[in-house]
Image (cartoon, helix red, strand yellow):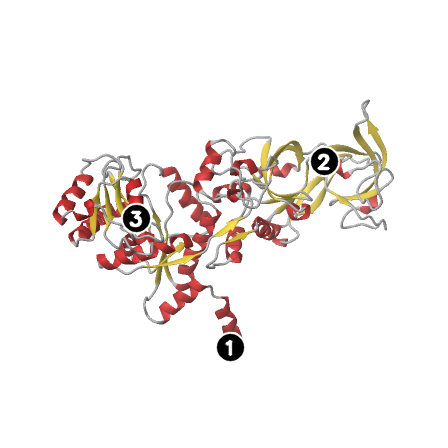
Amino acid sequence: MSADKHLEEEKSLNFLEEIVEQDLAEGKYKSIMTRFPPEPNGYLHIGHASSICLNFGLSEKYGGGTNLRFDDTNPITEDTEYVDSIKADIKWLGFDWANELYASDYFETLYEYAVKLIKKGLAYVDDSSSEEIAAQKGTPTQPGHRNQFAERSVEENLELFADMKAGKYKDGEKVLRARIDMASPNMQMRDPLLYRIKHAHHHRTGDAWCIYPMYDFAHGQSDSIEHITHSICTMEFVPHREVYNWLIEKLEIFPSRQYEFARRNLSHTVTSKRKLLQLVNEKYVSGWDDPRMPTIAGYRRRGYTPESIRDFCDRIGVGKRDNMVDLGLLEFCAREHLNKIALRRMVVFDPVKVVITNYEQEGEMLTAENNPENAEDGNRSISFGRELYIEREDFMENPPKKYFRLAPGQKVRLKHAYIIQCDEVVKDEAGNITQLNCTYFPDSKSGADTSGIHVKGTLHWVNANDHIAIQINEYDRLFTVEDPANESSEFQSYINPQSLRIVEGALAEPSLAEATTDNRFQFLRKGYFVLDKDSKKPPFIFNRTVTLKDSWAKAGK
């Protein structure tokens, strides 16, 4: 490798890769181990995709593995539906985990760790209410103070903690706290909670437990049990790192290390699980996988590819400062990949009939390429006949200058077919255009044109006697403002009323009847589309993934 090439690769490393390379070079680890630890209380969203790509990407690049560990320590909000959806999303993104684990796997070990802290005089049972505990912690500029419960003996704390486990107390009646430093400038270090009582059925352990570890107690210890070398969190967990390290040190267990990176917030989107659940429960969307939702399941249903989402995560990179990423970048990544793989098809959304008056054949089969970007996709046959449909917007009776679509006396090319000229406009009694009578030029056939006629407009079409009717869901951004969560009004007030436009009665090439949800299509001149997962019978429903161009930037929105 040349020195220049080596220097270029060094410059391209993000700060986490630099840390890993230094750790490996110094012999701290033979291989690395990362983890992705979602709480199963909702579907994964685009922010989780960044974390997935980061954690799995590091272990793939440097050797090792990534554990999928469900942080299932809050039985009230968790469900196996979410567990299943999370696993499906990770697989769809193209990753596989080394081990499937649950924080609940460690409940007995974590309990023993808590007992160890009590025996060392480093934890105590507190009867204070949550409000009292908050008041006792002081303020960022004022130290906190301990209450009388902190003076309990080791023996009394052991007995009370065992009684908590045995279910002798009500929810909120007692908690277990670490004894650290009530004067610490880091508020998280002021005797943080380790356990709370919750009499709730757990999706895996049933009713075996009624005390559950807090995040600060479950996270670092679970990392240590699994020998996680690089525990990667988002920046809001920076204050928790001191607690993380303190607990590992006092418990004398494997020294996992926590590192933080900044969130990349996505414009015109909310990713708070609470807000997403609100959208679902209040019926603003049809469910967690509604194609307008920023969930991985929503993007999959909308037609995004795993490659495009991984590309997006790679482009936004890893940093230490939060910033807002324009949704247009994600849409760009989708277009970039879909342009390479999408099969081209002709679909007319708002049809008007064209009759080719001098076409005297019964019909013929024409050849059309499936994807000009990939010759391996081959060609398909499409039927052509005397009666066709084109888009109503592709005809104008009194066109302005430089109008290159169909108009009286004007010529256009029909895609993959012939050049036609409009000779007559037929209207009903109300003055609505019902039919365009045209003539065609037999020697202008695409691929064998000897007519010498030059036209600037090319229109897509479907055969009036050989097509299927489909429904089209034209999805757009769910919110009209860049940062709906930070606006003065409730975020729901910024929902885009045009986020879904349903087009019924669109006409398509018959081959779309054979479409599957694995196929991606470009409807010529319209955008990229995918068959909806719930579309089982005619008329088939197709969801718009993205438009062919960034219409929001063009409109200055």
Q: In this view, does 99 lie to the left or right of 464?
A: left
Of badges 3 and 1, nearer the viewer stands 3
Residue at the far front: name it.
142
Q: Is mark 3 on a helix, strand or loop?
A: loop
Looking at the image, tell me whether mark 3 or mark 2 is earlier in sequence order.
Answer: 3
375 or 160, nearer to the observer? 160
Residue named by callout 3: 137
| Label 2 element class | strand
In the drawing, what numbered circle is on residue 463? 2
- Whether residue 510 sits left or right of residue 102 in the image: it is right
Q: Residue 73, how many percent across, how many down?
A: 31, 43
Point out residue 381 in the picture as x, y percentages from the top left corner: 68, 43
Can you give x and y, in whole percent of width and height, for residue 536 in the image?
53, 32
Amino acid type of disc 1?
Ala
Inspect the image, locate mark 2, and give the three-letter code of the amino acid beneath it: Asn
The residue that label 1 is drawn on is 3
Camera-side mark, 3 or 2: 3
Camera-nearest label, 1 or 2: 1
Quarter occupied by the C terminus: top right
Q: Earlier in the sequence, mark 1 or mark 2?
A: 1
The Cα–Cα distance between marks 3 and 1, rounded to whole angstroms, is: 55 Å
What amino acid is at disc 3? Lys
